[in-house]
Amino acid sequence: MKVLLSIKPEFAEKIFDGTKKYEFRKSIFKNSDVQKVVVYASSPVQKVIGEFAIADILNDDVETIWNETSRYSGITRDFYLSYFSNKEKAYAIKIGKITRFRQARDLSDYNLSFAPQSFAYIR
């Protein structure tokens, strides 16, 4: 099973150039069968640009997750702390094998009419 995540284009690019090895989330999908993440680069790109395998999902307090992932986070500590402000727990999806699509795809290719706020399960 796969999930589609909306990711800002600058961070999506860092995933596919290999400098961002973790994708951070305030909440995570409940279905444990999810093995891949399909990456939707949000505005202004608004296209599905690739996917990656989930190598692991880390879940701990905000500071611990930062300490474990900061070297390959692809973001600044200030951005990270701002994103997780007022949160006790953080999730970090460890990015496995990446596949960049030769041609970007539309959400309609996945039977979606709009980008999900957090994620959407897809086939």
Image (cartoon, rainbow, N blue to C red):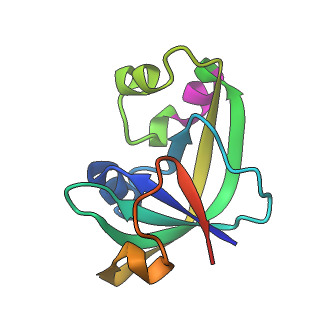
Expressed as whole percent of the image width and height from the top left, the position of residue 93 reads 60, 49
Q: Position of residue 104 (x, y in %)?
A: 31, 79
Quadrant assignment, res 97:
bottom right
Please give left or right for residue 106 compared with residue 31 in the image.
left
When the figure is inspected, residue 53 is found, relative to residue 13, above or below; the finding is below
Give 118 or 18, whichever is nearer the viewer.
118
Above or below, 55 against 79 in this view is: below
Q: Is residue 14 inside the magenta stretch?
A: no
Q: Please state, as top left, top right, bottom left or bottom right, where the C terminus lies in the image.
A: bottom right
**Left or right: 13 with respect to 80?**
left
Q: Residue at x 40, y 73 (%)?
A: 107
Q: Residue at x 40, y 78 (%)?
A: 108
Residue 90, x across and y down, in percent? 62, 30
Pick out the residue farthest to the right.
Answer: 32
**Front residue (pair 65, 6):** 6
Figure check: 96 above or below 14: below
Horizontally, residue 123 falls left or right of residue 83, namely: right
Q: Please tell me whether the stretch drawn in magenta is mainly helix, strand or loop.
A: helix
- Which part of the image, by quadrant, shows the N terminus? bottom right
Residue sticking out furthest to the top? 86
Whether residue 6 is visible to the viewer of this picture, yes or no, is yes
Q: Looking at the image, can residue 97 be seen? A: no
Number of disc labels: 0
**Which of the 4 image quarters holds residue 32?**
bottom right
Q: Which residues are magenta?
A: 64-69
Residue appearing at x 23%, y 62% in the figure: 45
Residue that sits furthest to the front in the current view = 113
